[in-house]
Image: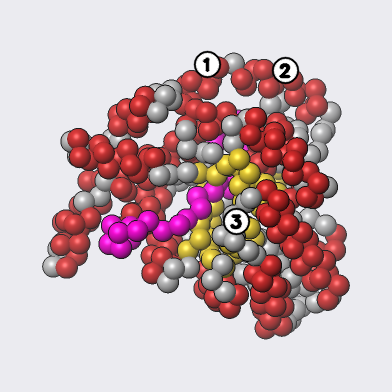
Amino acid sequence: MTLNSERTGVAFQALDGLAIELPSWGFANTGTRFGKFIQPAGATNTAEKFADAGQVHAYTGCCPTVAVHVLWDFPRGVADIPEVAQTAAACGVGIGAINPNVFQDQCYKHGSLGNPDPAVRQAALSHILDCVEIQNASGSRDLSLWFADGTNFPGSGSIRARKQWFTEGLRAVHAALTGNQRMLVEYKPFEPAFYHTDIADWGMSFLLSKSCGPRAKVLVDTGHHYQAVNIEQIVAWLLSEDMLGGFHFNDRRYADDDLTLGSIDPYQVFRIFHEICYFTWETGKAPDLAYMVDQSHNLKNKIEEMIQTACTAQELFLKAALVDHAKLAAHQAKADLVDAEECLREAFFTDVRPVLREWRKARGLAAEPLAAFRESGYLAKAEAERGAKNRGGVSSYA
């Protein structure tokens, strides 16, 4: 596909409208259940996380906000807001989605909002409501909710009772939201719960969100699906029901995440973006979606892989925006199977990197973000400043 001036205009408009939120925890030293591999430049505190995120935004131009985890980034709660907000601004980014933590403390061994102990359910709800206060104080729009709740053995919990407890808890959270605030309810098929997970798929998230009210939407994590699940169909259905709130970007080899976006199946990411762009073309209105990264790499350099992710998202979103939707709709109406598919293939195989370089140049950005970051010397400086702290075993989530 050759881009004429009109198509280049479409490309620039698409890129200008794409904002991708970075996760603060993705810059810290994290690990798996088996252990962790420390990186000398890993962020050891919230200020360093924002500084690293600011680097990604400075070189890609599309990552203006940072999602935060309350226990890790606001250990004192609302009292930390002024300092964190000032630090974020100094690094050229803003505070994004607020992520409660109702899985780390020992009391959540048997669940949070789905725990059979009413006192634990109340503790979890109180923490989430505290997070809403942080939303209010920081100006954050989205409350991002993921729960580790579930059971590992048949008969060890009442599935229906836990559903009811979740309904009650989420409704209470929804009632506390004001202004333009939203709550995004994520789902995950398994891990750490291996018999049943309380919010295991998009249908469960959909039902819980609908029962709460208009501020509740479904959050789709591109990794949290079993093999062969058609994620773009889920996206299309949620769009049609006005229930899609946003995404967590990563990739999957099986049914979990933490792989770099597009590293396994870039065509699937393109197809997901295509459903969004097609919906926008048909309705004349872009859906209000939060695009967030949820990756925490133990082997790749954390800043470099975030730049990889942002650039990959830009490329694949741009390819989806370049689909000839009118032509596609005409082929679909006549059941022209080959020609309809070719509409997608032509866009997917278009080399959009030249127009991306043009866009970056027009926006005062480096033509090649990863190369420019490497040449900046930031990584060596961070390694020198943080190496001793990381070797000393500073907490991953400090």
The one of 157 and 62 positioned closer to us in this rendering: 62
Disc sitting over residue 142 in the figure? 3
Tag 2 and tag 1, C-beta contact below 8 Å? no
User: Residue 202 location, x and y as percent?
Assistant: 52, 68
Under circle 3, the secondary element is strand
The amino acid beneath tag 2 is Ala
Q: Nearer the viewer, mark 1 or mark 3?
A: 3
Residue 303 colored in magenta in the image: yes
Residue with the mark numbered 1: 375
Tell me the quarter of the picture where residue 174 sits. bottom right
Residue 310 shows in this picture: yes
Q: Residue at x 15, y 62 (%)?
A: 330
- Residue in the picture at 81% in, 71% down: 122
- Report if residue 245 lies within the magenta region: no
Q: Upstream in the sequence, badge 2 or badge 3? A: 3
Report which residue position mark 2 lands on.
384
